[in-house]
Image: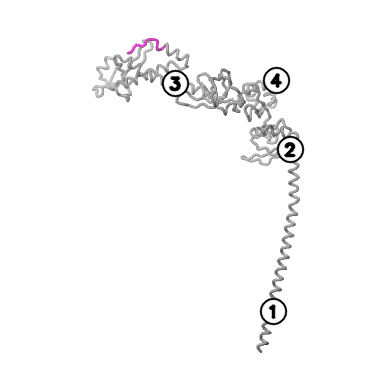
Amino acid sequence: MIKIGTALFEAAEQFEREKGISKEVLIASLCDALAAAYKKHIKDKDATNVEAILDEQAGEIGVFRTKVVVKVVEDENTEIALTDAKEIDEDVELDDEVKIEVTPENFGRVAAQSAKQVITQRIREAERKMVLDEFMSKKGTLITGIIQRRTDRAVIVNIGKTDAIMPQREQIPGEYYKPGNRIRVFVLDVKETSKLPQVIVSQAHAEIVRELFELEVPEIEDGIVEIKSIAREAGFRTKLAVWSNDPSVDSVGACIGPRGTRIQTIVGELKNEKIDIVRYSEDPVEYIVNALSPARIISVDILADEEDRHEAFVIVPDDQLSLAIGREGQNVRLAHRLTNWKIDIKSESQAREIENRQVEVQYEEPAQEEYIEEDEEIIDEIAQEAIEETSQLAVDEEDSIVEETTEECTEEE
């Protein structure tokens, strides 16, 4: 046995406090490393009956081989004679297994050198697995981190046991991420790598709005108010469709809170991003009207209501057209993503022009048909006259031939 004292256990306990890796994992790694070093020492890496055992009370560790008790030994590496086994344990019988210590002399230094790499690798594996398990459970949730640094296309955020990456596409446009500032981010994905797991976080994802509302609005957390859909353009505007499962609870009012306290907290968290809260409805007309708020709507016509095709034609007052469409089409674009309906918006005067144009087309079509019929009658008359002229010419020509023949016959006589 190799004397190791209590220093190893003290170091393992300290490592557990600092890194969160249990003492048992470190001790198991040490035993596996010592067994691997022994197999390398005897040049038999395939030996299956070799193990290292640690006696924590005595502070010693050694290598043992498990051998089967037999009458006649044929393989010294796996078998032991009954008489030899009795010296170790008087109660042993044939076909029993006994553990024989095989720790070589002066093996401590060799074992330490060989075990160092194995222990380091096991610690890294344990740390990677621990981080992976922790953040896999946090995937799809909000966590708080500290901005470490900025790169050309990403922001590095420390989230505890590892650093997370926030790609440029997941950042809020125009936002300045200063190193050292605390930041709340959404865990978007966790990817396993050869080193520590790679955690991808976001501040632009629509689900971050859902998480914030669940934190601030108890009715949502309790399931009384339900978020049906979210459409977001990070840093600018978000539309949120909510529904109340309790008729006595106003879904929009619950999200806004007393004197707007709840919504103000969320807007502040999102760096003053504008948030429109609308009531969800199973009636597509009502849902579209709500989604296009704050614009006033005159009418909504459903053009197509199929499984893979939803189209609606919306008419608004002339002075509401720009409000309904929004800056650079933002309002109607978010309404489309919120409702999953393709929305064509026209002002009242534009709709009237379209209607008048359709009426003119309908009025002109019969005249065109009459003109075509008149043309056909004229063509028929011309064709009939041509036929009659042709027939008359043929008759005249035939008479002329007959007269000439008669004259010729008279002259010959």
Mark toward the viewer: 2 or 1:
1
- Of 244 and 68, nearer the camera is 244
Q: Which residue, given by chain and number where applicable, does mark 3 sit on?
A: 126
**Mark 2 residue type:** Ser
Q: What residue type is labelled 1?
A: Ser
When asked about the image quadrant of residue 138, the answer is top right
Q: Position of residue 71 (x, y in %)?
A: 24, 21
The residue sitting at 74% across, 60% down in the picture is 374
Does the magenta segment cover residue 238? no
Judge by depth and name the residue closer to the eye, 289 or 201.
Answer: 201
Which residue is labeled 4 in the image? 258
Residue at horizontal 73%, vertical 52%?
365
Q: What element carries label 3?
A: helix
Of marks 2 and 4, the one in the foreground: 2
Question: Range of the magenta residues?
Answer: 1-9
Alpha-carbon distance for marks 2 and 3? 64 Å
Q: Name the residue under label 1.
A: 400
Which secondary structure, mark 1?
A: helix
Earlier sequence position, callout 3 versus callout 1: 3
**Alpha-carbon span between mark 4 and mark 3:** 48 Å
Q: Secondary structure under badge 4?
A: helix
| Marks 2 and 1 in Cβ contact (< 8 Å) | no
Q: Earlier in the sequence, mark 2 or mark 4?
A: 4
- The tag earlier along the polypeptide, 1 or 4, is 4
Q: Which of marks 3 and 1 is in front?
A: 1
Q: Which amino acid does label 4 sit on?
A: Pro
Label 2, label 1: how far apart the Cα atoms are: 79 Å
What residue occupies the far bottom of the structure in this picture?
413
Examine the rendered structure and indicate whether residue 230 appears above or below residue 162.
Answer: below
| Residue 400 in picture, x, y percent from top left | 69, 79
Residue 330 on image: x %, y %: 66, 32
